[in-house]
Every structure is written in C-alpha cells, then in structure tokens.
Image (spheres, helix red, strand yellow):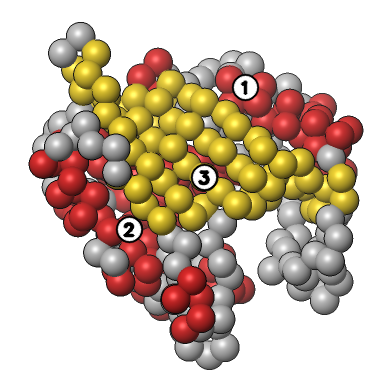
Amino acid sequence: MTKADKIFKANIETILTQGVMSEQARPKYKNGQTANSKYITGSFAQYDLSKGEFPITTLRPIPIKSAIKEIFWIYQDQSNDLDLLNEKYQVKYWNDWEVGDTGTIGQRYGAVVKKHDIINKILKQLAENPWNRRNVISLWDYEAFEESEGLLPCAFQTMFDVRRVDGDIYLDATLTQRSNDMLVAHHINAMQYVALQMMIAKHFGWKVGKFFYFVNNLHIYDNQFDQAQELLNRTPADKEPRLILNVPDGTNFFDIKPEDFQLLDYEPVKPQLKFDLAI
C-alpha cells in the first residue's frame, strides 16, 4: 500500500467516525437538494517527491491528465474563459460553475493570476534570490470577488521554498485549501499542484523536494457514504505511481505542455465510482 493510499483510507475512516455534519450548507446537487457533508478540520499530509512519494491514490482512477490541463489554464494561459478550457484542453467539468451566460467562472483563478502577474513575479523572485521566503501565490482576492459572482477558490494558496542538499537544489511546495471534497477532488488537487511545482523546478533546473498539503475543511458529501465504504474495502495496487516531466532542465515555464507529463506505474483499482457533484 502506498503512502497516499494509507493517508486516503485514514482520512475516510476519520471523517466517517469522528466527523460532524455541516449546517447551512451552500452547495446543491443538480436535483436542487442541499448538499450536506460530514467533515473534519485541519487535515495535513506530507510527501517527499524526491523519494518517489506522490499524493495519488490507487483505490480509484484519478483523471490526472484533465487535472494537469486545468493547471495550464490557470497558471500558463492565466484565463477564466470556459471556451478556452473546453476547446484547447477538452476539459468540461468547470462548465457547471459558469457565471450567468458570461462564458467564464467569474473573476477567479486564472483571472486573478493574470491581474497580479503572479507567475512572472514568482519566477523573478526565485531567479534573483532562490532563498527568499516570499514566494506566495494567493488567489484569495476580495476585490475580485466583489467584481463578479463565482465559486470562491478552494485551493487558494501555494508557497515555494528551496533547499540545497549535497550540492543539489530542491524546490518544496505547500498547498493550502479552505475546502476539499475528499473522495472526488483530494488527489486531483494535490497532483495538480505537484505538477505546478515540477514546472517551476524545471524552469530553474532544480529537483522537486517535499510537498506539504493542508486542508482546512475536509469532507465527504452525504450522498457519498456508500462509495466511501467501498473505497475502504478495496485492496490498493502494489506499485508506487510516479509523475515525470519529460523536458530538459531549464525549459521555460511557459514552453512546457500538458503532454510533457507522464504518469508511470499507475494501475488503479477499477471500476470507477460515480459521484453526483455538489455545485
């Protein structure tokens, strides 16, 4: 059993046995019913990517290709345009969060990245002084929230630090989420930001180091309890999956493409489970 599988099962067990039910929940299922959830607060995990530990479960298939494409939409295209996401990347699951008939998700995610020129600033800071302690991506922009409707960002803050170990420079990353759907989005979000970490590391020719993952509200929706039990009963795969980025060291961040990523030794347990999303 991989480290990610152990953490995944432990989190599910903790939520089911120690979690509390939500009150005055905002999300709705597509049938209009309120999407309540059982949740815990303050979940933390650590993975050492340099030792082959990756935050992806083998207990069910995770759509990692679509997840990585979303990162390109947010941080390379710096866009909130759904047509771009649909047509360029063939990723459509964000369509349920379209704001009115604007064709966008509102002033969120990529729009905030573009507004503050975040990626160029992070790359410049790391180039000028890799050991600075101010490499923070924050998507929590109250001014942007007042400009339009839209889902407030869940994965809203990422921080980067470097370490030199035996002559090699390692890039570490910390992802903070205000809210996370344990069964559907947990490993999608984690692997997305590992991909972003790898892209920045490649830009400088560094190695990837540790990935720290903090979720403030980790939950399972009330229509997912059967699926949660099924996941607990499954026997995970033996192999440890690995994500690699097939570009030379020093490749410019904006020249990296989604197809440059490859997930190796990933043999998840099937069949896939179905989930009714909370919108």
Q: What residue is shown at x 62% (from left), y 22% (from top)? A: 237
User: Which secondary structure, mark 1?
Assistant: loop
Q: What amino acid does circle 3 point to?
A: Thr
Q: Earlier in the sequence, mark 1 or mark 3?
A: 3
Residue 42 in the image: above or below residue 178: above
Q: Position of residue 276 (x, y in %)?
A: 75, 60
Seen from the viewer's position, the closer of residues 82 and 121 is 121
Q: Which residue, given by chain and number where applicable, does mark 3 sit on?
A: 176
Q: What amino acid does circle 1 point to?
A: Ala
Crowd rating for badge 3 (residues with CA inside 10 Å; few <14, some 14–19, many 20+): some
**Which mark is drawn over residue 75?**
2
Q: Earlier in the sequence, mark 2 or mark 3?
A: 2
Count the labels in the image.
3
Q: CA distance from mark 2 to mark 1?
A: 32 Å
Q: Which residue, given by chain and number where applicable, does mark 1 sit on?
A: 237
Q: What amino acid does circle 2 point to?
A: Tyr
User: Which secondary structure, mark 3?
Assistant: strand
Q: What residue is shown at x 44% (from left), y 37% (from top)? A: 174
User: Which secondary structure, mark 2?
Assistant: helix
Query: Answer yes or no: do the residues labelled 2 and 1 have beta carbons within 8 Å?
Result: no
Crowd rating for badge 1 (residues with CA inside 10 Å; few <14, some 14–19, many 20+): some
Quarter that holds the N terminus: top right
Residue 243 picture quarter: top left
